[in-house]
Image (cartoon, rainbow, N blue to C red):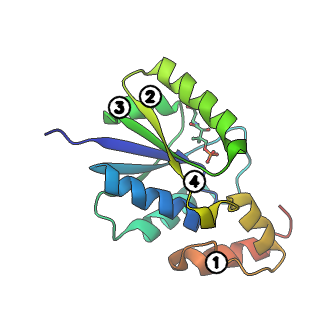
Amino acid sequence: MSMVTAICPGSFDPITVGHVDIIKRAADMFDRVIVLVAHNRSKTSTFTVDERVEFIKRVTKDIPNVEVDSFDGLLVDYVRDKGAKAIVKGLRAVSDFEYEFQMALVNKKLYPQADTVFLTTSAENMYLSSSVVKQVGSMGGDISPFIPDQVLNDIKIRLMERKEY
Ligand code: PNS
């Protein structure tokens, strides 16, 4: 039997409990999961790529088949390089679908050997996004329900230093 590798790509700026839910479920389905922090050239980020990688490592350290990496370039090049079969994405709402569907189709055209697998977000995380968390945190709101415990303090402090998102 061959090992099936899946890539969980995203900005993770920062990681939320919604991301953790998707990563855990992917880790149950695939032999090996690589959480991939993509440098996104069209988005300005709050946390550096290294910070985001370190946060995810801390949060996933007890899941043995999860690794964390970063990548600057085309996602499918990374997928090919790792011999991965799946790109895992979480879908929250219909509003996510159009963009995700477009990316899935482009990626499939560029690299037909891998498929995008959409996992439905748990109902309690439907509303959650990194940008909403950043807005709440920067205005002094309680972000503890949204951010994993292991990284909560670091993220809270950083968001309070910057006032607007
Ligand atoms: O968390 P996000 O911001 O929705 O993640 C988007 C991401 C990083 C997965 C996407 O922008 C991506 O794959 N970027 C890498 C560059 C690339 O391959 N672009 C073409 C995809 S159609």
Sequence-wise, the earlier of marks 2 and 1 is: 2
Q: Which mark is residue 49?
A: 4
Residue at (54%, 32%) from the top-left corner? 73
Query: Badge 1: few (under 14), some or many (20 or more) residues near its Cα, within 10 Å?
Result: few
Tell me if 138 is positioned left or right of 74 in this view: right
Sequence-wise, the earlier of marks 3 and 4 is: 4
Tell me the element at label 3.
helix
Which residue is the site of mark 3?
Answer: 81
Establish if 116 lies above or below 144.
Answer: above
- For marks 2 and 1, give the one nearer the viewer: 1
Note whether residue 88 is visible: yes
Which residue is the site of mark 1?
Answer: 145
- For marks 2 and 4, give the one nearer the viewer: 2
**Amino acid type of disc 4?**
Val
Tell me if 66 is positioned left or right of 56 in this view: left
Q: Residue furthest toward the left?
A: 1
**Amino acid type of disc 1?**
Pro
Q: CA distance from mark 3 to mark 1?
A: 36 Å
Residue at (60%, 78%) from the top-left corner? 152
Q: How many marks?
A: 4
**Amino acid type of disc 2?**
Asp
Establish if 61 lies above or below 103.
Answer: below
